[in-house]
Structures are given as structure tokens and as C-alpha cells.
Image (cartoon, rainbow, N blue to C red):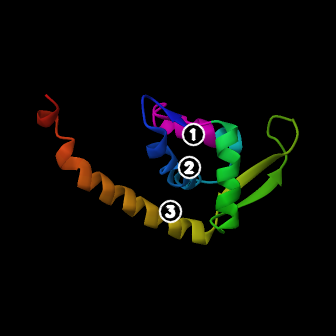
Amino acid sequence: MQGKDLDGNLLRGTLDFLLLASLEDGPLYGLRIIQDVQDRTDGHFRFKEGTLYPALHRLEKRGWIVGEQRPSDAGGPPRKYYELTEGGKTELARQREQQRAHARALAPYLQLWRLA
């Protein structure tokens, strides 16, 4: 996973949250998840299929998402769509609160007057 001039460790710690949040509005297939994260973060978070699919399989094993083969809307081969489970919605809420707490804790250090 890559970001604009960001440390890879910071990005890896955010991957599960980004994937769960991407699925919050409904089922998506892999490449659409990648596009969604890139679009919603203005390209700040970018990752490849080699990062995405192991992460999705991990989330499936934890019971937070479920995958289902569906016909392609473009007429190609079937695609695997992923959807949040109830457990995934609960986990997303927990992780979202952790992210908010993290952002609140960093806020005093991110003030513009301190960056000058």
C-alpha cells in the first residue's frame, strides 16, 4: 500500500478501516474498492491487488465481510462482491471511534501555527 509521501507502516495500520468503510454504503468488487478508497482520499491512499485481496480474505475469516460471486455488469466474467456483515458494521464503528480518538490526540500537534 502506498500513499503520497507516507510511511508504509502508517498505511498498513489503516487498511482494514479503509476497506470496511469503503463497503459501508453497499457491496463492491475488488477493483472498485481500490478506486473508492483512492477517490474518497483524493489519492492519498493507494494500494494494489496484491495488498487488497489478502486483506479482504483476512476480513472474511474474521467474519466482518462476506464475498459473493455475481455476474459482471460489464458483461465479462463474474466478479466477487464483498459486503459488510453485522459484525463488520460493529467493527467499523469501533475502528472509526479509534480513528477519531487518534485524530483528536494528534490535533494539538497539527495546528498550523506550530508548522510555521
Query: The C terminus is located in which quarter?
Result: top left
Q: Which of the labelled discs sits on residue 22, or is there none?
A: 2
Q: Secondary structure at mark 1?
A: helix
> How packed is label 2: few (under 14 Cα within 10 Å), some, or many (20 or more)?
many
Magenta segment range?
33-47
Q: Label 1 is placed on what type of residue?
A: Asp
Q: Earlier in the sequence, mark 2 or mark 1?
A: 2
Q: Which residue is mark 1?
A: 36
Q: Mark 2 touching mark 3, by CB under 8 A?
A: no
Does residue 116 show up?
yes
Q: Label 2 is placed on what type of residue?
A: Ser
> How packed is label 3: few (under 14 Cα within 10 Å), some, or many (20 or more)?
many
78 relative to 90 in the view: left or right? right
The image shows residue 63 at horizontal and vertical percentages of 66, 69
Q: Mark 2 touching mark 1, by CB under 8 A?
A: yes
Q: Secondary structure at mark 2?
A: helix
Occupied quadrant, residue 76: top right
Say if the magenta span includes residue 42: yes
